[in-house]
Image: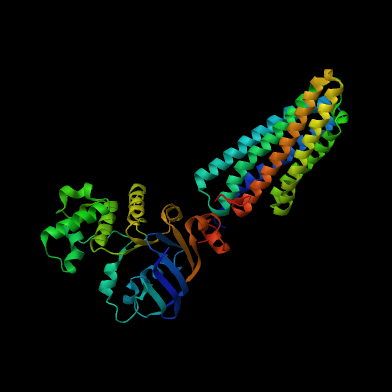
Amino acid sequence: MMRKLFDEELEKLNVDLTKMGHLVELAIENMIDAFKHQDKTLAKEIITNDRLINDMERTVESRAFNLILRQQPIASDLRNVTTALKIVTDLERIGDQAADIAEIIMNFEGEHAYRTVEHIPTMAKKAKIMVHEAIDSFIKKDLSTARLVKSMDDEIDALFEEVKQEVIEILKENSEKIDYCIDFLMIAKYLERVGDHAVNICEWLEFNQTGAVNDHRLI
Amino acid sequence: MSAKISSKNLNLHYGEKHALKDVNLDIVENKITAFIGPSGCGKSTFLKTLNRMNDYVNNVKIDGEITLDGENIYDPRVDTTVLRKKVGMVFQQPNPFPMSIYDNVAYGPRIHGIKNKKKLDEIVERSLKAAALYDEVSDRLHTSALGLSGGQQQRLCIARCLAVEPEVILLDEPTSALDPISTLKIEELLMELKDKYTIAIVTHNMQQASRIADYTAFFLVGEMVEYGETKDIFSMPKDKRTEDYITGRFG
């Protein structure tokens, strides 16, 4: 077998990226659990674990840079290495959003956003599905699932608008709730960003398979 | 995009060996076309059919057509000396003649009947400048070409090729015997020369093809498997055999 070393390095890159994907998915799942049950211990754990995700980002980046340096990948090899470099950023950001929400949960006193704002649980579920499907489609190199995730972006954006309206209504009734309301809105915004990063991952899968993103030929 | 050279259903046999199988390919004017593929795939054989260098090989049988500006170069009426003046060639090992730098470059023009000293001086200077060698040798034009470095010798061979004012330059692994700096100089030279000439190059160096060629053709056991713009061949090759070869999975 030729290029044994090259294939081994590519495999390690892929394994690390997959591992990181699972960690990020877990962060999102835990975040939703912590949110649902106001579980501050779990929220704290998410924040601690985010460091692992950040470390993995550096590992993947380093592997990818060294592959470029030492192997000068071309064709599908180049697409695999550059895709890893792009996706790793989105994964890390999703981890960050989970940690940001966990931070808010840690500081929660009083009103329970998960129950108070009707559309937040729906958003959280949607974000979780998007992340799961995006990572899964990437691992399986499944373009049709990736397209499905992309189509979900409009739904999560619309949900954000719903949350905004709800928050406005809450404030109209009682302007003293402004502190919680800002938190609710921020959580919703973070969830909406999680959806965006899931979409990005799907776009990079598209690039990986076709060399193009949204019909824009990149390579 | 006009085709300077067209190969139509070209088949070549060395005795029983079918060395080129139905090759159809256009070489675009004022572009660099690279031929890549593992050893013995037929890429050098194909390059040599473009100025009939295979005529000298025993037992060779060529069918099909190669046209230069629409004229079949295998037509019996074609004078191969005139053909090779139009379609020059540079080889893997720099092969300067054992004579002075000046005489190396003036050799071709003299054969084609130019005797006038002033005219020859002009041709030598122009060719050496075009080959990016003049500045390095202008003070020793009448010393032996064999004293030049490998990279300089190869640029001298390019100058010698340019001296007879060709239209097409064929290069058979022109940098495989050279160090990286000399290689880069030749590559930059070829990029400049393509404005005036049509260039076809055989190379084993994948990075070289991707750096300088506008078009790349991949050959495998006598077959031209895939041909297209270099950026497509090296990013999204259509044929799995191309992908496997360029990424080093075989070859």
In this orientation, does residue A27 appear?
Answer: yes
Quarter-wise, where is residue A131 in the image? top right
In this orientation, does residue A6 appear?
Answer: no
How are the residues colored?
Answer: rainbow
- Foreground of the two, A2 or A211: A211
Q: Is residue B222 above or below residue B126?
A: below
Q: Is residue A170 above or below residue B130?
A: above
Q: Is residue B12 above or below residue A209?
A: below
x then y, percent, for residue B179: 35, 49
Quarter-wise, where is residue B14 in the image? bottom left
The residue under the point 72% across, 47% down is A150
The residue under the point 73% across, 43% down is A153
Is B218 on the left-hand or right-hand side of A31? left
x then y, percent, for residue B211: 43, 52
Is B43 on the left-hand or right-hand side of A54? left
If the image is split into quadrants, where does the N terminus of chain B sit? bottom left
- Foreground of the two, A159 or B134: A159
x then y, percent, for residue B93: 31, 60
- Foreground of the two, B95 or B240: B240
Q: Is residue A36 above or below residue B246?
A: above
